[in-house]
Amino acid sequence: QSALTQPASVSGSPGQSITISCTGSSSDVGAYNFVSWYQQYPGKAPKLMIFDVTNRPSGVSNRFSGSKSGNTASLTISGLQAEDEADYYCSSYTTSSTVVFGGGTKVTVL
Amino acid sequence: EVQLLESGGALVQPGGSLRLSCAASGFTFSSYAVSWVRQAPGKGLEWVSSITSSDTYYADSVKGRFTISRDNSKNTLYLQMHSLRAEDTALYYCAKPPERYNNGWSKLGHWGQGTLVTVSS
């Protein structure tokens, strides 16, 4: 399976909103509402931020939100903070009963 | 508190075999699907395999070479790896779904810290 497509990097100033896109196909992102987003700091394990396109696990800030349109999912971080600087990965369940990840996006807070 | 503790990573020669383990605690292990995800040095995440109570799933890149299994009596997940290649070099994580999403193995709410597999001569 081909990896989902994410921008390599996104940046923003504190307080701003940024959006990370995640483009797949009708065999993954477009097929189901099973898109997840993960945050990963260097040397640390990933952390689930959004699952099933729009759901936040308990404890995750409501500054993080997810959406989907067609074959593209998006993660929006509102009120950007220094602590949001990390790598972000999307993933999707596929019609082949597998999971595919995106290549990752490095978020920089200016 | 949910804990997932991977072990078994090592330096192995190309063509060799290795078995990874993931000891789980803090939840009813037998009730949850569990998964392996890997991350090559400096690279992104790659899903490897998942197992439910009755089914197993594999990425094309490991199908036929890796076998996932579980021992619910020991609360332990395994990944048996054969015919290892240089491209299998990675940190291998085990992970489980969030609470109440027992078979939602595509969403990984809890992760271990990983065990490093290096395939090199």
Image (cartoon, rainbow, N blue to C red):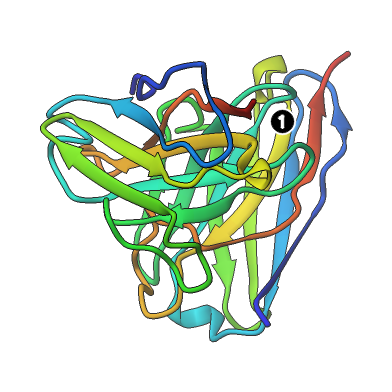
Mark 1 surroundings within 10 Å by alpha-carbon count, few (fewer than 14), some (14 through 19), many (20 or more): many
For numbered disc 1, what is the local secondary structure? strand
The quadrant in which the N terminus of chain A is found is: top left
In depth, the one of B108 and B52 nearer the eye is B108
In percent of the image, x 16 and y 31: which residue is there?
A27
**Residue B7 position in % (x across, y down):** 81, 55
**Residue A11 position in % (x across, y down):** 54, 23
Amino acid bearing label 1: Ala
In percent of the image, x 34 and y 68: which residue is there?
B103
Query: Is residue A108 rendered to the left or right of residue A38?
Result: right
**Residue A44 position in % (x across, y down):** 75, 46
**Is A60 above or below relative to A11?**
below
Residue B51 in which image quadrant: bottom left
Q: Which residue is mark 1?
A: B90
**Is B109 above or below relative to A107?**
below
Check the residue under mark 1 and report the chain it is in. Answer: B
In depth, the one of B121 and A2 nearer the eye is A2
Query: Is residue A94 rendered to the left or right of residue B32?
Result: left
**Is B104 above or below relative to B94?**
below
Residue A25 in which image quadrant: top left
In depth, the one of B58 and B3 nearer the eye is B3
In percent of the image, x 49 and y 36: which residue is there?
A89
**Is B71 above or below relative to A103?**
below
In depth, the one of A24 and B9 nearer the eye is A24
**Residue A41 position in % (x across, y down):** 70, 41
Query: Is residue B13 rendered to the left or right of residue A68?
Result: right
Residue A30 in which image quadrant: top left
Q: How many marks?
A: 1
In percent of the image, x 58 and y 38: which residue is there?
A14
